[in-house]
């Protein structure tokens, strides 16, 4: 992930426009903005070129997800799965039905508000639904 703020700040410092940077990197505007908005990853070659042009270190332009966050997400998922495994079949079915309803409500809300959000509950519902057979077989 590229650090958009750091790149934009550096462009102002050296009085270079994004258009000039795009031309020097030799990419399309769409491709550059996809990188900047973290919709697509830039190649290592292009990131190095960007760093050379802006006279920045790789560590200045790349944002990494903190390992602690990854650990917390994994531990929460494990906790949810442990709880699920300890449920009886009736409770599992109720939880899955609830999760599916939450997913439907959440997706409908996103469509009505024309917003793109991170669907955490919908992801949980999907995860539980996909793993129902596997997780459900080991109460």
Image (spheres, rainbow, N blue to C red):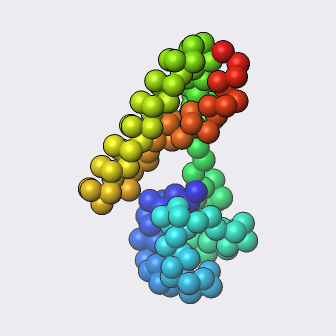
Classify residue 100 as left or right of residue 92. Answer: left
Name the foreground residue: 85 vs 18.
85
Q: The C terminus is located in which quarter?
A: top right
Residue for point 46% across, 41% down: 122
Kindly tell me whether residue 63 is visible in this rendering. Answer: yes
Classify residue 115 as left or right of residue 38. Answer: left
Q: Where 92 sits versus 17, above or below?
A: above
Q: Position of residue 28 (x, y in %)?
A: 56, 84
Name the foreground residue: 56 vs 84.
84
Q: Position of residue 71 (x, y in %)?
A: 62, 29
Q: Position of residue 23 (x, y in %)?
A: 56, 87
Name the foreground residue: 66 vs 135.
135
Q: Where 21 sits versus 82, above or below?
A: below
Residue for point 60% across, 23% down: 81
Residue for point 60% across, 82% down: 27
Q: Quadrant of residue 103?
A: top left
Q: Position of residue 19 (x, y in %)?
A: 47, 84
Q: The N terminus is located in which quarter?
A: bottom right
Q: Where 10 sits versus 15, above or below?
A: above
Name the foreground residue: 55 vs 3.
3
């Amino acid at each position: 992930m590229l650090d958009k703020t750091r790149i934009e700040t550096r462009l102002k410092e050296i009085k270079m426009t994004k258009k000039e940077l795009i031309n020097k990197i030799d990419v399309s505007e769409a491709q550059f903005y996809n990188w900047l908005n973290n919709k697509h990853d830039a190649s290592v070659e292009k990131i190095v070129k960007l760093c050379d042009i802006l006279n920045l270190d790789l560590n200045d332009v790349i944002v990494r997800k903190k390992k602690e966050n990854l650990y917390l997400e994994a531990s929460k998922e494990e906790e949810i799965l442990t709880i699920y495994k300890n449920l009886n079949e009736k409770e599992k079915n109720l939880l899955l039905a609830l999760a599916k309803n939450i997913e439907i409500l959440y997706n409908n809300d996103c469509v009505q508000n024309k917003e793109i959000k991170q669907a955490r509950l919908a992801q949980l519902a999907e995860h539980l639904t996909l793993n129902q057979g596997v997780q459900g077989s080991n109460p």
